[in-house]
Image (cartoon, rainbow, N blue to C red):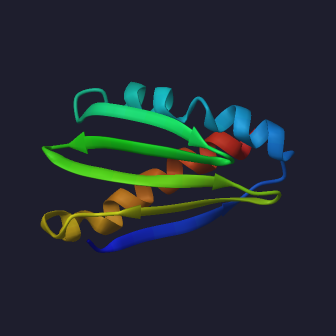
Amino acid sequence: MPKFGFRVPHTLSKEEARSRLERFVEAIEAKFANQVSDLQQTWEGDTLKFQFKTFGIALNGGISVEENQLSLAGEIPFAAMMFKGKIESEFREQLERLVAG
């Protein structure tokens, strides 16, 4: 499966960034309630693993909490490649808001 990913810098402590990231799934559910289903998250060390379906397409990945940045890496099905840019920009926007203030 093709991959997608990016980094979002932050000035928070690692603990505060992780605490805010714990609300990530809630933020996604609230904003995209009619477009997202089967949303799940689990922690593996300092990485939040997630998976969900949007318009019947399954997406999964992880967001690693680092000292000065969040690093997102995920896989996108070939069927969704035309939406890769939109998916990345929505993730980036949500994560930037999460660590902004």
* Residue at the (34%, 64%) spot, across then down: 75
Q: In the depicted view, which residue is nearer to us: 94 or 47?
A: 47
Outermost residue, front side: 44
Q: What x and y, as percent, mark residue 3?
A: 37, 72
- The C terminus - image quarter: top right
Asked whether, in this view, residue 45 is left or right of residue 13, the answer is left
Asked whether, in this view, residue 49 is left or right of residue 37, the answer is right
Q: In the depicted view, which residue is nearer to us: 45 or 1?
A: 45
Q: What x and y, as percent, mark residue 2?
A: 29, 74
Asked whether, in this view, residue 68 is left or right of residue 44, the answer is right
Using the image, determine if residue 95 lies above or below residue 38.
Answer: below
Count the marks. Answer: 0
Using the image, determine if residue 49 lies above or below residue 81.
Answer: above
Q: What x and y, as percent, mark residue 49?
A: 49, 46
Using the image, determine if residue 73 lies above or below residue 58.
Answer: below
* Residue at the (61%, 66%) spot, across then down: 7
Outermost residue, bottom side: 2
Asked whether, in this view, residue 72 is left or right of residue 70, the answer is left
- The N terminus - image quarter: bottom left
* Residue at the (27%, 31%) spot, across then down: 38
* Residue at the (38%, 28%) spot, across then down: 29
